[in-house]
Image (tube, rainbow, N blue to C red):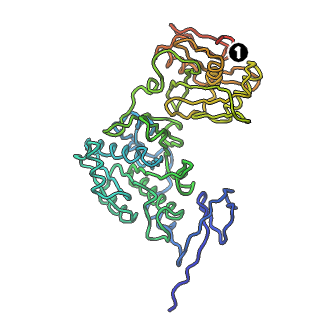
Amino acid sequence: MPPKKSSTQFVCAECGAKFSKWAGKCLECGAWSTLFEQEIEGETRGIGAKAMLLETGSKPVPISQVPTEHAKRLSTANVEFDRTLGGGMAPGSLVLIGGDPGIGKSTLVLQTLATIAAAGCKTLYVSGEESAAQVKLRAERLGVAGGDMLLLCETSLNKILENAKKIKPQVMVIDSIQTMYSEELPGTPGSVSQLRECALKLMIFAKSSGTVTMLIGHVTKDGQIAGPRILEHMVDTVAYFEGDKKGQYRILRTVKNRFGATDEIGVFEMTSLGLIPVQNPSRVFLQDGELSPGSAVSCTIEGSRALLFEIQALVGKSSYAMPQRVSAGVEQKKLTIILALLERFAKLQISNSDVFVSVAGGLRLDDPGIDLSLALAIVSNALNISLPPRSIVIGELGLSGEIRTVSSLDLRIKEAQRLGFEKIVVPSSGKIPVVKGVELFKFARLEEAVGWLH
């Protein structure tokens, strides 16, 4: 009998669409340069609808009769991690955590599992990248090697699920999803078909058993989770680590959460004993002492938390034909718009100057409420004038130079007062709460705020 002929197909890394020929652009999702060649031998098999029915065994029931007693969340014993997850780990949830290599993904989940295992919960840590000895050495370094956490070093998903069904853990970690494979499908671990199949099987297991399942995901050079986009759609929660891995602080941000608020953040400090939660993040991102020219303090809303931060600007004479516009933590387009507003309404001549702006501490912000603070930081450095001590600036800028009100203004003002700020620049429109011990400066237009700085 002659051997089966192998054939190839081209699969889109973004949407998983399959094509017989290579093309520069995916005809399904429109992404460029995402098609890669994949060899197929024989019939491609997935878990199939029949197998899914056997796994779940679900039946239609009235929503009023759905029990919710089992929905009590399990605490991670880490305040910042609980906040990021929306108040703890929901039973049956599928959580995906991504981030750059070495930023602390495995460290955080290993600490979490060891802590809750010590509290009497049954946990299973599955490592597809490290040996048992390597995981033990890392646990000893973190001081969590003496617990009852179960460890399994395996990459075959079928064997992992067999062990999990016998053990019945309350929390299971897969480190990482890109190293898992299913024998029912061709292709190497990390391919589109393998990732999609493994994620689907883990989702069915988590929902049917009530096991909290955490997936560690590799990221591409662009910072996105490696693999098809459908992976992020299938899971319940997606969280990314931000910050410089060589720095002291890490930020875990949720971009999707079916059990809590999106854009919630947790702030951690990397120490020799692993990631330690930061109880007062606002103080971390603020510098003690008076502000220097080019620095301004503002407040942003991250999920349900008001967070104070310092934004810095540097304006200098350009030695290039095209002046440089460099931003870190703020969108480049936002900087361009604010510079145009300062030229037009504040009469600040900086079109031939280099402008650099940065958010201290490695924060990345897209809150429109920081517009006015960024504008005044640029003016402060250009004119070499410091903002008043213990002052904070809050406001959004419109394209006609007006200062617009921002969301959760009362929460921002209360957080500023709690940290000892006495002067707050706010928009004159909207409902402004009156807070004792705080002097409010209300402005309607950008030129008025710049005049106050003079």
Residue found at the very far left of the displayed protein: 146
Image quadrant assignment for residue 379: top right
Is residue 188 shown above or below 112? below
Q: Is residue 415 left or right of residue 372?
A: left
Q: Can you give x and y, in whole percent of width and height, for residue 144 in the image?
A: 26, 44
**Which amino acid does the dot numbered 1 rest on?**
Ala
Q: Residue at x 52, y 66 (%)?
A: 49
Give how far across and how far down residue 3 sits, in percent: 51, 87
Q: Residue at x 56, y 8 (%)?
A: 439
How far from the left and from the top, in percent, is residue 24?
69, 62
Toward the viewer: 119 or 176?
176
In the rendered image, residue 270, in percent from the top left (x then y), is placed at 38, 37
Callout 1: SS: loop
287 displayed left or right of 164: right
Residue 86 seen from this side: no
Mark count: 1
Task: Tell me the residue that label 1 is attached to.
Answer: 444
Residue 51 appearing in the image: yes
Identify whether 363 is placed above or below 91.
above
Q: Quadrant of the C terminus?
A: top right
